[in-house]
Amino acid sequence: MKNRIRIATTLFMAMAVFSMVNAQAPLVKLQLGKGLQIMAADSSMSMKMSFRMQSLFETERDLNSDSEWATSFLVRRSRLKFDGFAFHPSLVYKVELALSNRDLSSSSDLSQTSGAPKIILDAAIKWEINDHFELWAGQTKLPGNRERVVSSQNMQLVDRSRVNSLFNIDRDMGLQLHSSFNAGKMVIKPIIAWALGEGRNITIDNQGGYEYVGRLELLPLGEFKGKGDYTQTDFAREVKPKLAFGASYSFNQGTPRQSATGRFLVDENGDYFHHDLQTILVDAVFKYNGFSLLSEYANRTVTDVEIPEEPADYPVDLIDDNNRTYTTGYGFMVQSGYLFKNNWEIAGRYTYVMPDSGQSFNETTEYTLGVSKYFVGNSLKIQSDVSLSESPGQDDMNLRYRLQMELAF
């Protein structure tokens, strides 16, 4: 009798556990380009896990010298991303990790990152307060130029322009308040941000002051389909013309860093420099029926010291013991492309950058022509481009060819 009771009890408990597990079993969905999507059975949380990689072949040569072609083949980017909501759909999270050596490399000294690689790209929580306001907290991209905020997965050329690499404000740790309002057909999106000002994955204490960023976006013809204002190619083939303007202003108080991703400047005693950097970023994007047009202007200055025109008169307190300075100057780029119905795209870009006095980079003009084939949108594609750049003062003329494959799931 006791054995029967034990058996009955065991069966009952097993059935109860099975029922509980079955009731709490998550809903799982896997789709190319949309990752592995998991939803709790009680809808209390969700998670999407996705992975992507870019394999890049690159070769270049200085046409004004007898140098040989310099060739490389590497994993340009490799990313693992998790996002979803927790507790309530209005509480969203995002974590993105960098895996490739190129991703992990840092121009900053190891002392600012505790000697660790910069694996974490994004680690942020977003609270959708209501239909108009959203509060972000954590490490993520600051609301800077559109070309930088657009994911590297969603580019129509192999990589971003030199204007972006020199003058973007990248990622940082802090708070952001995003908002959106309608004024008739027009959509207005103001954004403000407060950040530490030293960049991502920094472990030292805050140096100098903080970084304050404001951005205003105007969409006079209404919203783009599928957030197309932050995807360079017009996959949606907008039936009606769509236009967006954006302007960002960043004031980084007392920063010791050359730029958002540059090196930290220290004097001969190892003490950090502290100067105020101002960055102005203006951009516009237009899309219609497969045609896309993007343009950006950037300008960065040191605001608390007067910069002379002659390099020899450059202030000593802005040059460290390795002859490095803050990255200042201005740049302009315009980029356009057309997506054919067979999902081949041709695109071109003109880039111009001009440094302030005493800079480590040169005045450069670059022309880029690219061809892309999209198999599954930006999730599976092959892209190639060829660029010709010249620096008048240096008598340099450089020819570069790149071929890249992207896979995301």
Image (cartoon, rainbow, N blue to C red):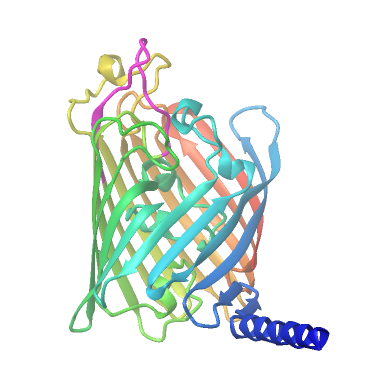
Residue 277 part of the magenta-drawn span: yes
Q: Quadrant of the N terminus?
A: bottom right
Tell me the quarter of the picture where residue 191 sits: bottom left
On the image, the x and y values in percent for residue 335 come to 43, 59
Can you say whether 24 is above or below 390 in the image? below
Residue 193 part of the magenta-drawn span: no
Q: Nearer the viewer, residue 344 or 23?
A: 23
On the image, the x and y values in percent for residue 22 come to 65, 84
Q: In which quarter of the image is the C terminus?
A: bottom right
Q: Is residue 329 left or right of residue 388?
A: left
Residue in view at x 55 percent, y 60 percent: 81
Can you say whether 7 is above or below 82 in the image? below
On the image, the x and y values in percent for residue 379 come to 61, 69
Can you say whether 351 is above or below 310 in the image? below
Residue 278 visible to the viewer: no
Q: In this view, does 46 lie to the left or right of 375?
A: left
Residue in view at x 45 percent, y 71 percent: 85
Q: Is residue 109 left or right of residue 134?
A: right
Residue in view at x 31 percent, y 40 percent: 197
Residue in view at x 70 percent, y 87 percent: 12
Farthest residue, direction top: 269
Q: Which of 231 and 110 is in front in this view?
A: 110
Tell me the quarter of the picture where residue 302 sits: top left
On the image, the x and y values in percent for residue 348 come to 50, 59
Magenta span of residues: 261-279
Majority secondary structure of magenta residues: loop
Residue 284 visible to the viewer: yes
Q: Is residue 70 left or right of residue 370?
A: right
Looking at the rendered structure, the number of numbered marks drawn on it comes to 0
